[in-house]
Image (cartoon, helix red, strand yellow):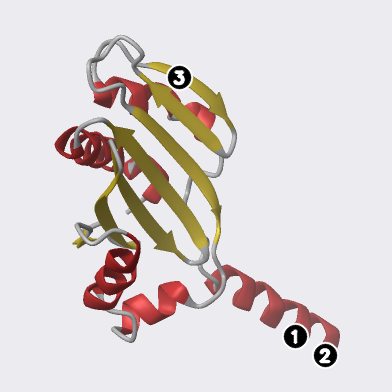
Amino acid sequence: MRLAAIGLALLVSTAAQAEGFPVDDLTGVAGDLRAALGSGFTQKAEPKRVTLACTNCAEKPVVDVQLSRQTDGTEQRVRSGQTTIASLKKQCQAKSPSCIVNRLDVPPAVGWISTYSMGAIAGSTAVMLRDGDMLVVRSIASDAAVARRNAEKVVAAARKVIGN
């Protein structure tokens, strides 16, 4: 009886644990991510990575989406306010003075998006964290507005990955 009680307690504690993102294989959403960017984009999809590119577009945009784990406490520090958007902006501006960082509204995940320049190329990176899972969208293009817009489109299309 005592063994059964311990087993039940383990099952209950396991069921109560957070599960992270409901999608752990990006190949099933790769088409949705590509469609969000419009015509001209091609895709290469793997379970933990999708790369989207438009070689015929004037701005030569490329968007890379990666699914991984982040268990170093960053998510908890962002949720608690210990790590603020202002502190993330300061870190980003140390690398690129023109960097802009904004909070992403992606509940139940937490996240932020940055936009920065790298010489003749501009980038925008969105980071979303949920229960140790991390989804990163990196977008580059010759134009900062295009890089940012593409990152935002892919984040919106990635709601299936993030969940409710």
Q: Number of numbered discs present?
A: 3
Q: Which residue occupies 37% across, 57% down?
A: 128
Residue 43 is left or right of residue 116, and the answer is right
Q: Nearer the viewer, residue 160 or 86?
A: 86
Label 1 CA crowd tier, 10 Å (few <14, some 14–19, many 20+)? few
Q: Is residue 157 visible?
A: no
Instruction: Tell me the amino acid under the disc marked 2.
Output: Arg
Find the distance from the CA under tag 2 to the CA under tag 1: 5 Å
Residue 1 is left or right of residue 15, and the answer is right
Q: Nearer the viewer, residue 4 or 47?
A: 47
In this rendering, is residue 112 above or below 36? below
Q: Is residue 138 visible?
A: yes
Q: Nearer the viewer, residue 12 or 23?
A: 23
Mark 1 lies on a secondary structure that is helix
Q: Which residue occupies 38% across, 44% down?
A: 137
Q: Residue furthest bottom?
A: 2
Q: Residue under label 1, please give it.
A: 5
Horizontal and vertical percent position of residue 21: 47, 53
Q: Are marks 2 and 1 in contact (CB under 8 Å)?
A: yes
Q: Residue under label 3, please give it.
A: 43
Where the N terminus falls, by quadrant?
bottom right
Q: Residue under label 2, please give it.
A: 2
Q: Which residue occupies 26% across, 14% down?
A: 57
Res 105 → quadrant = bottom left
